[in-house]
Image: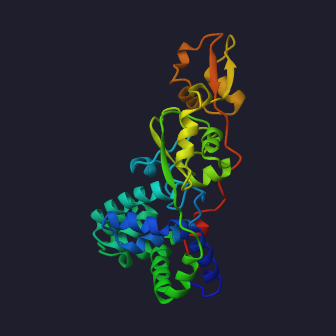
Amino acid sequence: YFDETRGKERLARALTRGAPYLRTISEIIKSYGLPEDLKYLPIIESGFNLQAVSRRKATGPWQFMAYTAKKYGLKVDWWIDERIDPIYSTHAACRYLKDLFDIFERWDLAIAAYNAGEGKIYSKLMKTNGEKFWDIRRQVKRETRNYVPSFLALLLFINDNENWVDSILESVPEFTYDSVMVPTQANIKQLSSWAGITDFEFKHFNPSFIRFATPPYLKNYWVRIPRGKKEIFLSNMENTPKDQWFKAETHTVKRGETLSLIAKKYGVSVTAIRQANNNIDPRKLRPGMVLVIPYGLTKSYRYSNTSKKATTSVT
């Protein structure tokens, strides 16, 4: 399950991507009373690629499907996708893994269920009268069949090559930041300018904001900025009139237009337009009304084409 050459190169890349966050992830995992080795599970899931998206649309370092992500407290909609955030998603993963362990009372089964879903693992156990992963291994799909052995092989390799792993982790700066509270919706460009950083840098600190602005429904939310920028950020925010915080394109409703037609014209969802306009009722749309039109992805945000199939093994 671990190829000494190709696997080692891929592992080095994954560790380099994960290195800035591993200390924080480790602390979060320990705070839930879970085994610290789980911090390496994103290597199997995504190669620690924060923007990895599988063919089934599982997203982020922990490869959450939208339904499961929302179930465990992550926001996922047109405006925001907290699956991409390495810190928020780790909290959700810990809650999910804790539930899985409570169900199966064995880590081999809990980890298999993280990949395949608890329902599938439970049904295989019932069908075979099995008690551990190895009892049902031949009954599950190939991806899950290799998932647990790959993770165990990864842990063995890391434990046998501690100096090599440490040299990689120590060569990458830790992800550090200050947090500031913003009371209402703002454009990403505005937030970036307050901190004196580029949009791209802001997205590095706040990868879950996937549009041109923060969600209209978020009030008193936290954003991350580089260390030492908090004072200037707060000063700039306080000195900027509220009507300049959020700007967007507008559309004057014409006779016969519906929200669906307007959404199609601008290439956005009806939900996004409704949210940007105080959850306007489509039935109350009238000619002459002015709607705020949210627009698409910021230039600094792009999903990768990484597939789940390609990231379920460390070989």
Residue 1 visible from this viewpoint: no
* Relative side of 150 to 94, left or right: right
Residue 69 coordinates in the image, percent (x, y): 45, 51
Residue 134 placed where, x, y %?
A: 38, 79
Residue 82 visible (yes or no): yes
Q: Nearer the viewer, residue 116 or 232?
A: 232
55 left or right of 37 in image: right
Question: Relative to 185, is 307 above or below?
Answer: below
Height in image: 108 above or below 2? above
* In the image, residue 228 above or below residue 235: below
Give the position of the N terminus as an image quadrant: bottom right
Left of 208 or right of it: where is 201?
Answer: right
Q: Quadrant of the C terminus?
A: bottom right
Residue 131 locus on image (x, y percent): 29, 74
Please determine whether, in this image, residue 58 is positioned above or below residue 187: below
Please report the residue visible at 52 percent of the width from the left and 61 percent of the height from the top: 176
Query: Is 58 situated left or right of 198 in this image?
Result: left
Residue 60 picture quarter: bottom right
